[in-house]
Every structure is written in C-alpha cells, then in structure tokens.
Image (cartoon, helix red, strand yellow):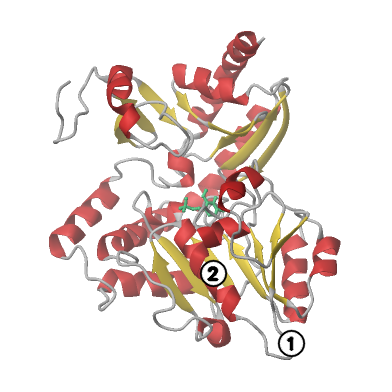
Amino acid sequence: TKSEGGTPVGRGAGNELLARYGQSLMGVFGTPQRVLVRGSGTKVWDADGKQYTDLLAGIAVNALGHAHPLLTSVVTSQLATLGHVSNFFTSPPQIALAERLLQLAEAPAGSKVFFANSGTEANEAAFKLARRHAGTDESPRTRIIALENAFHGRSMGALALTHKQAYREPFEPLPGGVEWVPAGDADALRAAVDDTVAAVFIEPVQGEAGVRGFDDGYLAAARQITREAGALLILDEVQTGIGRTGDWFASAPVQPDAMTLAKGLGGGLPIGALITFGEATSSLLSAGQHGTTFGGNPVATAAALATLHVIEEQGLLGHARSVGAAAADALGALEFVTEVRQYGLLIGFDLAEPVAPAVVQRALDAGYIINAPGPSTIRLAPPLIMTEDELRSFAAALGGIYASATQETA
Ligand code: PLP
C-alpha cells in the first residue's frame, strides 16, 4: 500500500485497504462503505479512483461542496495566522460569527452564542439550559418534552432527548425527566405542557426519522403553548439550519428561546452552536457551566463565516428551494416511489419495497452517495451547489438501481 500524505491511503488500495485496516476503526455504522480520498464540488473519489456524485454531503454538512476555493483559502490563511486560542481568549472570526448568527436569527438584545464542535455538544448545552430553567421550590419545572422519533445526538444528555430505544437501552438510566409526545400533534403538545415543563425540544424537520416535517402552524402552535406555560422552546436546527431547507432556519419566522446549529454551519469543518434568545434565557447558563476546549476556534469559525458568505453571495437559499423542488418532481414521477418529502435540499422519499439498504449499495456501484434512514426510506442532503441536472440524472438512474436492489433481495 502506497502512502499519501503520511496516511496509509494510496491509489488502487480501495476495498483492499478497507479489508486490511478497516478493523482498527470503531465505525459508528459498522464497517465504512468506501475509502474516500478526494473531493471537488459535488463529486468525490474513492481510493480506486471511482467517482461519485455526492448526494449526502457528509450528512447535510458540505454545504459548498468539496474543496471550495474560498473555504480552502480562508481556512488555510486562518490556520497560518492563528489556529487555536482556548476559552481564555476569543478571536476576530469567533466574534464576527456570533454577531452574524444573531443577525440572521433576528435575535433580540441580550442574545448570545455558545460555540461547540458538534450538534451533540450544542444539544448537551441546550439540555443543561433546560435544566437551569428549574422554576421555583414551590413550583419546580422538572419535565422536558421531546417528540417521538426525535434524534438529538448520542452523548448522555443528548441521548436522553433522543427517542430511539435501541440507542438508549444500553445506557439507561439516562438523565431523567424527558417525555415524548407524538410528533406534529399540537393537541398532544398542548395537553402535555404546563408549568411543570422546563423545555420543549423540536427538530423543525426530523431528518434522522426519514425527513419528516410538520403541518404549517405546528411550530407556531408550539411557540404559543410554551410561551403560555413559561417553558422554553428549544429548536434543534442541527440538520435543517444554515440553508439546508432553503431558508437560513427551517423554523423561521418562529423564534425559539434557544436554537442549536452544527453540520452545515462550518461548510465541512467541525462546529456547533447554541443560540440563546434574549437576556433572560441567555443568563440561565452561566460561565463555566458548559465548555469545550476547541469550541469556536478561529479556523472553524472562519470557515463558518466563509460558508455564510458564499451561501448569501451565490443565492444558494433560492437555489436549494428550486433545484430541491425539481428533484422532488422527478423522484415523485417514479412509479416505485410512494412519497416524497422535500424541504429545500433535504429530501426524503419512500420506496414501494423495504429495500433501501440495498438501494444505497447499488447506488454506490452506480456512482451516487445516498443514505437510508429507514428500511424503505432514502435521504438526500446534497451540497447546496448541486445542480438540477445532477439530481435529474440520479432520478433517471434510480429505476435501474431499484430494479437490481429488489432482484438482489428477492
Ligand atoms: N441533532 C440533529 C437534528 C441531528 O440530525 C444530529 C445528527 O444527525 C445531531 C443533533 C447530532 O449532531 P452531531 O452528529 O454533529 O453530533
């Protein structure tokens, strides 16, 4: 095996390399599917030189595609200028990003941003925020409401909010007080929320649950219900935020008490953020109650600023809406696709047969990276620069991919 840049990844290694070194990795989803060595725009290449159209963008991450020239130069020059400072200091990109996020979120005076490195860490901070909204001795707020099928991450606090029993079970007892209500059901939420509730956590579109959004008015109802009960509304926009759904935030114009961001924010660099809206909410968590050494480091925050800049400059919000809608039309026209759920460039669709994992494999063979959040469900979350032609080509190829997947599993 040749060595490239000090790692044992060389051309021609491919699956042979995976077989040889793969066992040393504790993969989150088991053995990784391919060794990817290079990316440019909407394309990536594996160690055998095979090209893929990246319809997943590292799960809703690479908003500008791969190796975007501005992102590359900003990250390189920031690293050459100042790479890391620790929490005892701040840096110009960190301050500028905090201000820009508050501006985009139209956050009122007294709002703040806490930086982390991932969605999980941002939600861990939000969970602590909820715990600090504890009410009084006479009227304690001990309950936290989340939605059925919610995914908020896998640290102990974030996992406490995540609904999936298979993820939770090995780690029970998790931090307590969390209850789940049916997703999208405003009456169920209204029935559950009273002055014993500290916070309600909602993903505006449940990505891991198969890309499932809610009827118009649900988030506004959640806002009203929580406000009346004095509970915090905390929106997890980790997957949906920063342009993914064709808006800066999928929840707009509803304004929460706190919002978490990650994934697409850094354009590919690891970053997370918790925005707390208004003085009262911002003062719930005080200095030292949550922290991380790398959170908000100059390189990641500079990358995020460059990402926001390019999204705005190139009109990628409108682009995500229009090409996403075109893709949904093309997918919806396929006879084996039973439902399409499209929010900008976050797209879920259901197949007539429960062959989604096989479809993912055959799509890889055909040069497309997609993902299956359920047995019959496919998710696309491509770079925001993905073209309509590329999405239409995928839809055109899907017939053959589906046919071979159903044959294989028959
Ligand atoms: N919240 C939501 C809505 C997510 O979709 C995810 C990841 O899929 C997370 C939180 C966890 O984020 P991370 O994987 O960056 O820790």
Disc sitting over residue 403 in the figure:
none
Q: CA distance from mark 1 to mark 2?
A: 22 Å
What quarter of the picture does the C terminus occupy? top right
The amino acid type, in three-letter code, at marker 2 is: Ala
Q: Is residue 274 above or below residue 59?
A: below
Q: Earlier in the sequence, mark 1 or mark 2?
A: 2
User: Do labels 1 and 2 touch, CB within 8 Å?
Assistant: no
Disc sitting over residue 126 in the figure:
2
Q: Say whether residue 31 is left or right of residue 230.
A: left
Image quadrant assignment for residue 31:
top left
Q: Is residue 410 above or below residue 200?
A: above
Residue position marked by numbered label 1 in the rendering: 139
* Depth check, front residue: 228 or 108: 228
Q: Say whether residue 248 is left or right of residue 185.
A: left
Residue drawn at point x = 45 percent, y = 69 percent: 101
* Depth check, front residue: 70 or 400: 400
Q: Is residue 99 in sight in this rendering?
A: yes
Label 1: element kind: loop
The amino acid type, in three-letter code, at marker 1 is: Ser
x and y percent of residue 289 in the render?
44, 78
x and y percent of residue 2 in the render?
15, 23
Residue drawn at point x = 74 percent, y = 87 percent: 139
**Circle 1 residues within 10 Å: few <14, some 14–19, many ≥20:** few
Q: Is residue 315 in sight in this rendering?
A: no
Label 2: element kind: helix
